[in-house]
Image (cartoon, rainbow, N blue to C red):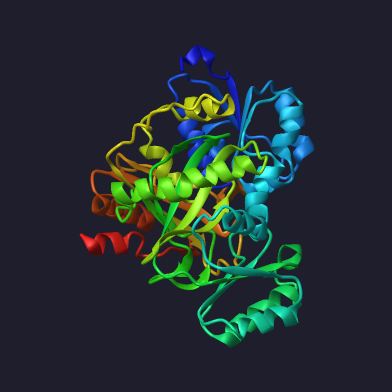
């Protein structure tokens, strides 16, 4: 697609590391288009203009797009999509990359997704759904442990409990259905058998029945080294995930990706956006853990830098039903992202701690902002659970890891915390 046919102005919606990665990728387009963000964060504001409109302020975002003559909107987080931002933008005549509310329901309701998976015989774990405590407890007593208890709705990536014992599973059920642990998101729950294997993430650009598979990646969900502690939104990731060989990727495409895209379309959903497929590589073959209706965070931070094609042209083509029929051009380098979080995350954590970042980063290393802000004194400070993503691109994963961790050490913050073993499983296989 020639630059002359690309939109002249792009608005990225969101405020995390994912959105910072999207902004950087769009700025790298040969078309040199105007890029802005709402609401953004302290780091994004150093790259592009940011507007103080919250990501869940649907009316405000539509008005902003009109006022700023935005020709294309790229939505990062799931909440505005579930609230119907894409629907409202399309109604206003503004092209948007991100599914309408019916497509966003694939993430907003785990039960809805599981029903589609089971209906269309896409490989996934057996499951049952409940909205009352006693039937759920009775079901648990007939299952083997470990088992997975999931809140149906959006819970910022933390609504999944992998219970090792019956007592843990019963406690999770009571916490969600009776204790209100996840609020409205936990009023219905899904209980599914625990899949055993290695997990991988696959991001797919979807336009109706067309799709393009992005580079493979592998996330680290648990807060602690050795995959210990509670789940988080993601503590680090790397790409490619070499456990997904070309042969296995072809199988995943044939058994999961293609059938998923066709199943969604057959349900009457005209999906335009990223379909994030969480996959467990079990002894019986790859199986779907979840769908998300947007780019992953922190997967985006390692996937986008490895795409050799123009990312702006790719996303714009999806909105026009013009995805290329050939595979994307992928850079051979390895990418790693280490998330620096505020100590205490994903539970209680402090905000407002001063941050000092290195300015003389080596080639291939970047620091993407997530939970950052500028305080009244003009200092860069922490403003969220996940604060920064230190990303490195290098010829080997070992080199990428060394570069990323060296940069992490140079970040000055009293409350910084990060895992020390991102990519360890793949490095140990070498």
Name the residue nearer the viewer: 199 or 262.
262
Q: Quadrant of residue 345?
A: bottom right
Which residue is depicted at the point 51% across and 54% down? Answer: 122
User: Most extreme residue toward the left, as rendered?
Assistant: 430
Front in this rendered view, residue 46 or 143: 143
* Relative to 2, 332 lies left or right: left
Splitting the image into 4 quarters, where does residue 331 fall? top left
Residue ID at (71%, 43%): 101
Image position, residue 399 (x, y; %): 24, 50
Give the vertical position of 276 relative to 12 (above or below): below
Give the residue at the far top of this rendering: 4
Q: Quadrant of the C terminus?
A: bottom left
- Counting from the top left corner in percent of width and height, residue 323 is at 49, 27
Residue depicted at x 36% and y 31%: 308
Q: Compared to 272, does 300 lie above or below?
A: below
The percent coordinates of residue 13 (x first, y second) are 63, 38
Res. 79 visible in picture:
yes
Q: Is residue 70 left or right of residue 370?
A: right
Q: Is residue 78 left or right of residue 225?
A: right
């Amino acid at each position: 697609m020639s630059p002359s046919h690309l939109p002249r102005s792009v608005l990225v919606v969101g405020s995390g590391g994912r959105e910072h990665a999207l902004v950087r990728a769009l700025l790298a387009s040969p078309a040199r288009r105007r890029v802005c963000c709402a609401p953004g964060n302290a780091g994004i504001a150093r790259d592009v203009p940011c507007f103080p409109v919250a990501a869940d302020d649907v009316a405000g975002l539509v008005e902003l797009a009109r006022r700023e003559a935005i020709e294309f909107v790229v939505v990062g987080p799931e909440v505005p999509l579930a609230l119907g931002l894409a629907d409202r933008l399309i109604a206003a005549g503004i092209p948007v990359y991100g599914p309408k509310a019916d497509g966003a329901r694939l993430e907003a309701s785990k039960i809805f997704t599981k029903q589609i998976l089971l209906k269309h015989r896409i490989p996934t774990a057996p499951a049952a759904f409940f909205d009352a405590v006693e039937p759920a407890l009775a079901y648990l007593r007939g299952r083997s442990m470990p088992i997975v208890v999931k809140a149906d709705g959006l819970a910022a990536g933390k609504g999944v409990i992998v219970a090792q014992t019956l007592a843990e599973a019963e406690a999770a059920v009571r916490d969600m259905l009776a204790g209100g642990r996840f609020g409205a998101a936990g009023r219905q729950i899904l209980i599914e058998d625990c899949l055993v294997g290695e997990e991988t993430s696959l991001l797919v650009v979807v336009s109706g029945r067309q799709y393009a598979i992005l580079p493979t990646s592998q996330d680290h969900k648990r807060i602690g080294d050795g995959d210990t502690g509670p789940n988080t939104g993601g503590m680090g990731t790397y790409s490619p995930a070499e456990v997904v060989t070309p042969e296995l990727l072809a199988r995943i495409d044939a058994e999961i990706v293609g059938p998923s895209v066709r199943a969604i379309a057959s349900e009457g959903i005209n999906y335009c956006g990223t379909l994030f497929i969480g996959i467990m590589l079990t002894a019986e073959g790859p199986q779907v853990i979840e769908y998300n209706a947007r780019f992953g965070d922190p997967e985006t931070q390692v996937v986008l830098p490895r795409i050799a094609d123009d990312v702006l042209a790719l996303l714009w083509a999806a909105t026009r039903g013009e995805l290329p029929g050939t595979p994307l051009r992928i850079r051979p380098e390895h990418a790693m992202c280490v998330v620096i979080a505020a100590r205490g995350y994903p539970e209680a954590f402090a905000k407002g701690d001063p941050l000092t970042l290195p300015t003389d980063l080596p080639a291939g290393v970047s620091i993407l902002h997530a939970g950052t802000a500028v305080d009244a004194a003009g200092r860069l400070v922490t403003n969220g659970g996940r604060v920064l993503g230190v990303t490195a691109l290098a010829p080997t994963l070992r080199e990428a890891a060394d570069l990323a961790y060296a940069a992490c050490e140079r970040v000055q913050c009293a409350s910084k915390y990060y895992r020390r073993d991102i990519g360890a499983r793949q490095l140990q296989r070498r």
